[in-house]
Image: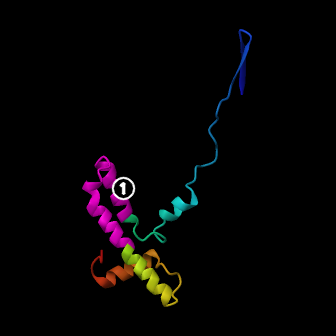
Amino acid sequence: MKCELHAANLICVYVMLPSKKPVRMPMVARRLRDPDINPCLSESDASTRCMDENNYDREKCSTYFLKYKNCRKFWNSVMIQRRQNGVQPSMPTAAERDEILGAMGKMPY
């Protein structure tokens, strides 16, 4: 803190020093960026990128939104089925998802 006296007024200036700690993403944001937790990460990134490139015109990105929605539906149904069968974890890991998609031969969404 730096204080100066100017014409009978005391002026104190607070100086913010850069912190030494690295800035960390909140836990929720880190989980959403984790490919083992979020199976539709690439679809989410593609829709966000489309919105950025098209000045947030939703109509131009509707195909990306539909693909993301179908991805979420597909993996949610897989998660429900695994939960009913007692398989843990209910959401397959990224490696397991690659195997599932490889066995299907094409993207189901």
Relative to 82, does residue 52 appear above or below in the rendering? above
> What quarter of the picture does the N terminus occupy?
top right
Query: Hey, which quadrant is residue 8 in on the image?
Result: top right
Relative to 50, does residue 100 appear above or below in the rendering? below
Outermost residue on the top side: it is: 7
Q: Which amino acid does label 1 sit on?
A: Thr
User: Residue 53, position in %: x, y?
Assistant: 30, 49
Relative to 76, does residue 32 appear above or below in the rendering? above
Magenta segment, principal secondary structure? helix
Query: Hey, which quadrant is residue 66 in on the image?
Result: bottom left
Relative to 30, does residue 71 appear above or below in the rendering? below
Residue at horizontal 49%, vertical 91%? Answer: 85
> What quarter of the picture does the C terminus occupy?
bottom left
Residue at horizontal 40%, vertical 80%? Answer: 77
Residue at horizontal 35%, vertical 64%? Answer: 43
User: Residue 32, position in %: x, y?
Assistant: 48, 63
User: Residue 80, position in %: x, y?
Assistant: 46, 82
Give the structural element (helix, strand or loop) at label 1: helix
Query: Hey, which quadrant is residue 15 in on the image?
Result: top right
Outermost residue on the bottom side: it is: 85
- Label 1: how many Cα within 10 Å (few below 14, some 14–19, many 20+): some
Residue at horizontal 26%, vertical 63%? Answer: 63
On the image, numbered disc 1 is attached to which residue?
A: 48
- In reply to whether residue 58 is colored magenta, the answer given is yes
Colour mapping used in the image? rainbow
Could you say which is closer to the camera, residue 58 or residue 7? 58
Q: Taking 31 as reference, is 6 left or right?
A: right
Q: Taking 34 as reference, is 22 left or right?
A: right
User: Residue 35, position in %: x, y?
Assistant: 45, 68
Magenta-colored span: 43-72
